Image (tube, grey):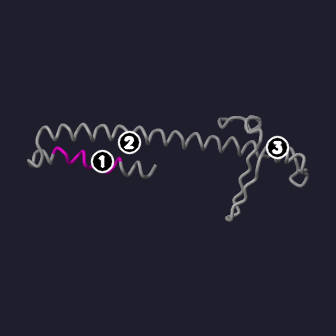
Amino acid sequence: MRNVQAELERTGRFFKSLYETLINGDITNIEYKEMKQSYETKIAALTEQEKNLRKSARLAELETVKRNKAINKIGTIFDETQFSKELIDTLIEKILIFEDKHIEIHFKFTDEIVKMGGTANE
């Protein structure tokens, strides 16, 4: 997202200086019109890309909230010391443990678990 925003800002600066370039006689009217159209098209595409990235980030955040709710509900149902091998085999696809002690749990029945967590708006 930062790259898109930086490119949008840079393109916006070029676009704003384009008219001054025309007035100074550095480009012709035809070049100005072509470059203006090109910058407008690029700005529109970058704006749309930024919008889509923001939407994806919001959706990922909502999904994280749902997963956290589901995990919290599961934690209240079972005492963490009573997870049996059979229960883990039934619920969990894989557990990833990273060097920074970050843990990811991939459930087999994601839809059902997320349903247990309710919606992010609750």
Question: Mark 1 to mark 3: distance in Å?
Answer: 50 Å
Determine which residue is flagged by label 2. 46
Overall secondary structure of the magenta stretch?
helix
Q: Is residue 106 above or below residue 81?
A: above
The picture places residue 89, in percent across and down from the top left corner, at 85, 46
The picture places residue 73, in percent across and down from the top left corner, at 79, 43
Magenta residues span: 8-19
Residue 80 drawn in magenta: no
Identify residue type, mark 3.
Leu
Q: What element does badge 2 sit on? A: helix
Residue 11 drawn in magenta: yes
- Which residue appears farthest toward the bottom when viewing the image? 99
Identify residue type, mark 1.
Thr
Nearest to N terminus: mark 2 or mark 1: 1
Which numbered dot is residue 66? none
Identify residue type, mark 2.
Leu
Which numbered dot is residue 11? 1
* Identity of the residue drawn at 69% across and 40% down: 66
Q: What element does badge 3 sit on? A: helix
* Identity of the residue drawn at 31% across and 37% down: 41
Cβ–Cβ under 8 Å for marks 2 and 1:
yes
Nearest to N terminus: mark 2 or mark 3: 2
- Which residue appears farthest toward the left when viewing the image? 25
Determine which residue is flagged by label 3. 91
* Identity of the residue drawn at 37% across and 52% down: 6
Question: Mark 2 to mark 1: distance in Å?
Answer: 9 Å
Q: Residues within 10 Å of mark 2 (few under 14, many from 20)?
A: some
Q: Nearer the viewer, residue 16 or 106?
A: 106
Which label sits in the foreground, 1 or 3?
Answer: 3
Q: What element does badge 1 sit on? A: helix
